[in-house]
């Protein structure tokens, strides 16, 4: 997949005057990749307000850097090579030690590149769409194999291996498989607990494809669900539907969260939904924008984002349902297509 990195750098350069800096030193590896195409663990790119740029890295990546469409220079201290008074820096990615070493006159800035990355072009969306298709297919292929007696770790391993077989670079993040009472922990780490008949099993996973991430959660029942399990599942499904329908360019992030959260609160489970409704996805699994009660920003067009409400009952279990979607003027486009009906395996 070919991206217009020069156009990305030009858009960033156009934002710098509003931040009162003449240049921005980009040191976040993900942001360097977004602006240049270089994947590395040690690089920096200086973007000037006049649109020019300079990329620096070390000997491990210099040959790859020379093949890109941005002037490059080799340096052992890439940040020190490029920084100068009046230069903006990425406060979230630069250590205090590095900041002090570079001297006075630097201007710490917030998520400038991250906000730019939130809106995707159609080439990026196609990669995310493919990552989601791999995720969907892995779930379809693994579900028939899930049975009592398997461990959470075994199920996670099956999902991750199947995504790799289907073409994923790697899992988008550490796969979550939470069974029975472990389902009350939103980010549970899979254990040797064996799945049992009557369990709810929550699986939160995704594929990474050519650097872009997918994110999906489904909760299934091992055998016919009990009454309380069906009640909680239906509640979360209704909240998730409300959140999906609220996604639109121009919608406030907090209002989208409220659309789903109010459904759960209205049923008396507000205290059992303890995280934000969703987050952007792209080159990172969690990126701008974020949906939550205190979020004030507005969504734009072509923003891939998750909607993932949950209800977590300590000592009993939980339910989460999550999709990756993209905001569109005519209504959100659903990327994860797996059914949201409660499957009884």
Image: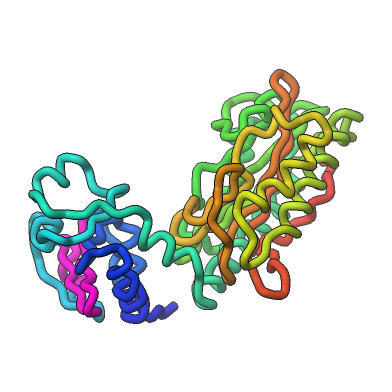
Q: Locate residue 318, reporting x and y percent.
A: 72, 31
Relative side of 131 to 47, left or right: right
Rendered position, 342 above or below 23: above
Direction from residue 135 to residue 119 in the image, left or right = left
Q: Position of residue 263 (x, y in %)?
A: 79, 42
Residue interval drawn in magenta: 42-65
Which percent across, then down, holds residue 151? 64, 30
Relative to 4, 67 lies left or right: left
Is 292 or 59 nearer to us in this picture? 292
Viewer-closest of 140 and 38: 38
Q: Position of residue 164 (x, y in %)?
A: 53, 56
Residue 180 falls inside the magenta stretch = no
Question: Is residue 59 covered in magenta?
Answer: yes
Looking at the rendered image, the quarter that the C terminus falls into is top right
Is residue 111 at all visible to an observer of this figure?
Answer: yes
Up-down relation of residue 136 to residue 314 (above or below): below
The number of numbered badges drawn on the structure is: 0
Q: In which quarter of the image is residue 112?
A: bottom left
The color scheme shown is rainbow
Quarter of the rendering occupied by the N terminus: bottom left
59 versus 266 height, above or below: below
Q: In the rendered image, is residue 164 in sight?
A: no
Q: Which residue is drawn at 40% across and 78% down?
A: 3
Residue situated furthest top in the rendering = 315
Residue at (23%, 56%) from the top-left corner?
89
Q: Residue at x 22, y 64 (%)?
A: 21
The residue located at (17%, 72%) in the rendering is: 54
Relative to residue 319, is residue 24 depicted above or below? Answer: below
């Amino acid at each position: 997949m070919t991206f217009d990195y020069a156009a990305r750098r030009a858009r960033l350069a156009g934002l710098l005057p509003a931040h009162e800096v003449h240049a921005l030193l980009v040191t976040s590896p993900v942001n360097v990749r977004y602006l240049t195409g270089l994947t590395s663990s040690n690089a920096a790119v200086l973007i000037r307000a006049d649109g020019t740029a300079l990329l620096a890295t070390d000997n491990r990546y210099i040959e790859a850097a020379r093949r890109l469409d941005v002037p490059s220079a080799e340096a052992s201290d890439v940040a020190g090579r490029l920084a100068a008074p009046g230069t903006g820096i990425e406060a979230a990615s630069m250590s205090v030690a590095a900041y002090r070493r570079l001297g006075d006159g630097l201007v710490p800035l917030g998520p400038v590149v991250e906000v730019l990355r939130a809106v995707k072009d159609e080439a990026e969306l196609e990669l995310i769409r493919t990552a989601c298709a791999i995720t969907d297919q892995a779930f379809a292929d693994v579900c028939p194999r899930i049975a009592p007696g398997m461990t959470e770790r075994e199920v996670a391993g099956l999902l991750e291996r199947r995504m790799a077989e289907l073409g994923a670079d790697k899992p988008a993040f550490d796969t979550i498989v939470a069974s029975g009472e472990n389902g009350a922990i939103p980010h549970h780490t899979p254990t040797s607990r064996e799945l049992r008949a009557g369990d709810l099993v929550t699986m939160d996973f995704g594929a990474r494809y050519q650097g872009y991430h997918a994110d999906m959660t489904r909760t299934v029942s091992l055998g016919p669900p009990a009454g309380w399990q069906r009640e909680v599942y239906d509640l979360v499904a209704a909240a998730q539907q409300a959140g999906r329908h609220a996604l639109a360019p121009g919608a406030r992030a907090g209002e989208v969260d409220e659309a789903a959260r109010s459904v759960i609160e209205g049923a008396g489970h507000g205290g059992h939904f303890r995280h934000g409704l969703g987050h952007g996805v792209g080159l990172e699994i969690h990126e701008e924008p974020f949906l939550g009660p205190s979020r004030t920003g507005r969504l734009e067009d072509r923003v891939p984002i998750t909607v993932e409400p949950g209800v977590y009952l300590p000592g009993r279990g939980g339910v989460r349902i999550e999709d990756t979607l993209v905001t569109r003027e005519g209504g959100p486009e659903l990327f994860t297509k797996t059914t949201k009906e409660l499957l009884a395996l």
